[in-house]
Image (cartoon, rainbow, N blue to C red):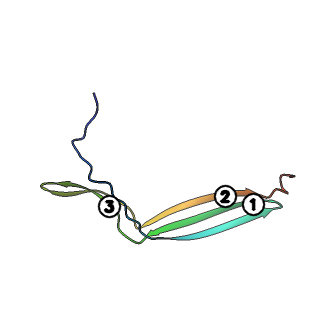
Amino acid sequence: MPFTTGLDSLAQSSDVIGALRGELRYELTLGGLWVAASALADFATAHTHYDIARPSGTTQLAELWLVRPGIGLSIGWTSAALGI
């Protein structure tokens, strides 16, 4: 028996908004190898939220943060480090 929620989705739509990213990065190089660690934050330029519209009114389900933190780890090498 399939699970149903009793909800119907509206027509699909998409919007494009700008975002800004701030990043602090530390990079360590050892010969042809390098490792970098970063702390970052994405800044949205518009509020994004998800709602359920009912005849009795609208209920907000979720709202994304305007600032979304993150971390990153990068590893790289040159062909010389691999002996190529």
Tell me whether the residue at label 3 lies in contact with that at label 2, contact meaning CB atoms closer than 8 angstroms.
no
Residue 44 sits in quarter: bottom left
Q: Earlier in the sequence, mark 3 or mark 1?
A: 1
From the top left corner, tell me how far across and down residue 59 is, in percent: 22, 56
In the image, 66 versus 5, the foreground residue is 5
Residue 22 sits in quarter: bottom right
Using the numbered discs, state the Cα–Cα distance from disc 2 to disc 1 in whole angstroms: 8 Å
Q: Earlier in the sequence, mark 3 or mark 2?
A: 3
Residue at x 39% of width, y 64% of height = 65
Kind of residue at disc 2: Ser
Kind of residue at disc 1: Trp
Q: On the image, numbered disc 3 is attached to which residue?
A: 49
Residue at x 32% of width, y 54% of height = 12
Tell me whether the residue at label 2 lies in contact with that at label 1, contact meaning CB atoms closer than 8 angstroms.
yes
Can you tell which of label 3 and label 1 is closer to the viewer?
A: 3
Using the numbered discs, state the Cα–Cα distance from disc 3 to disc 2 in whole angstroms: 32 Å
* Residues packed near mark 3 inside 10 Å, few (<14), some (14 to 19) or many (20 plus): few
Q: Earlier in the sequence, mark 2 or mark 1?
A: 1
Using the numbered discs, state the Cα–Cα distance from disc 3 to disc 1 in whole angstroms: 40 Å
Q: Secondary structure at mark 2?
A: strand
Q: Is residue 60 left or right of residue 37?
A: left
User: Which labelled disc corresponds to residue 34?
Assistant: 1
From what the image shows, is residue 3 above or below residue 82?
A: above
Q: On the image, numbered disc 2 is attached to which residue?
A: 74
From the top left corner, tell me how far across and down residue 2 is, in percent: 29, 31
Residue 45 sits in quarter: bottom left
Q: Secondary structure at mark 1?
A: strand
Q: Is residue 15 left or right of residue 11?
A: right
